[in-house]
């Protein structure tokens, strides 16, 4: 599976830590879009989709969450709760974000602008596409 946790170097002083995000250095793509999720209602989950081409880096800058990943063959679970840990996701990775703490803030860096046509929102369709892709 082309997903992995990335350690982000903490700079600054202990009283004021800082993490810098730089395209081509600790972000493995050119950044075209940045967005953040916050204020998710208790018991609600996010995600439930994959992207045909988009790559992302997800950082939990506050709080915590659990991310379930699937590429059609493998499954992986990642717990995000530190602002110096990021989750890299390539294209064709199904993601579900669960157990978001009330104070959870997720910052997402993407290598493309928003494009609804890049989304795969149906899990069965995703599995079919992943299987076809594996055969090619």
Image: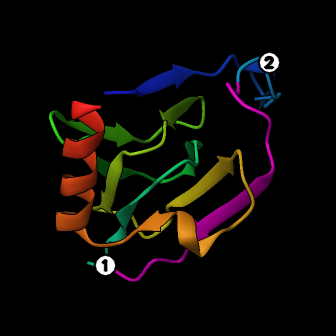
Rendered position, 96 above or below 70: below
Q: Are marks 1 and 2 in contact (CB under 8 Å)?
A: no
Quadrant of the frame with the N terminus: top left
Label 1 crowding class (10 Å Cα cut-off): few <14, some 14-19, many 20+? few
Secondary element type, mark 2: strand
Quadrant of the frame with the C terminus: top left
Q: Is residue 38 magenta?
A: yes
Quarter of the image for residue 128 reads bottom left
- Of all residues, the one furthest to the front in this rendering is 136
Can residue 74 be seen here? The reply is: yes
Which numbered tag is attached to residue 107? none
Q: Nearer the viewer, mark 1 or mark 2?
A: 1
Q: Is residue 85 magenta?
A: no
The image shows residue 45 at horizontal and vertical percentages of: 32, 72
The image shows residue 120 at horizontal and vertical percentages of: 39, 66
Q: What residue is disc 2 on?
A: 11
Query: 62 left or right of 123?
Result: right
Q: What residue is disc 1 on?
A: 44
Which secondary structure type mostly characterizes the magenta part of the structure?
loop
Nearest the viewer among 14 and 22 is 22
**Residue at 55% in and 71% down:** 117
**Residue at 80% in and 18% down:** 11
**Residue at 78% in and 28% down:** 15
Secondary element type, mark 1: loop
Rendered position, 109 above or below 98: above
The image shows residue 91 at horizontal and vertical percentages of: 47, 42
Mark pair 1, 2: CA separation: 34 Å
- Specify the segment rendered in magenta: 27-42
**Residue at 35% in and 72% down:** 121
Which color scheme is applied? rainbow
Nearest the viewer among 57 and 29 is 29
Q: Earlier in the sequence, mark 1 or mark 2?
A: 2
């Amino acid at each position: 599976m082309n997903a992995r946790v990335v350690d982000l170097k903490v700079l600054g002083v202990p009283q004021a830590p800082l993490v810098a995000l730089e395209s081509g250095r600790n972000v493995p793509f050119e950044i075209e879009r940045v967005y953040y999720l916050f204020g998710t209602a208790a018991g609600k989950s996010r995600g439930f989709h994959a992207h045909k081409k988009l790559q992302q880096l997800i950082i939990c800058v506050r709080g915590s969450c659990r991310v379930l990943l699937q590429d059609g063959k493998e499954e992986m679970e990642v717990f995000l709760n530190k602002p110096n840990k990021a989750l890299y996701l390539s294209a064709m990775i199904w993601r579900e974000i669960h157990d978001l703490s009330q104070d959870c803030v997720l910052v997402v860096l993407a290598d493309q602008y928003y494009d609804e046509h890049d989304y795969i929102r149906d899990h069965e369709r995703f599995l079919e596409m992943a299987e076809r892709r594996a055969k090619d």
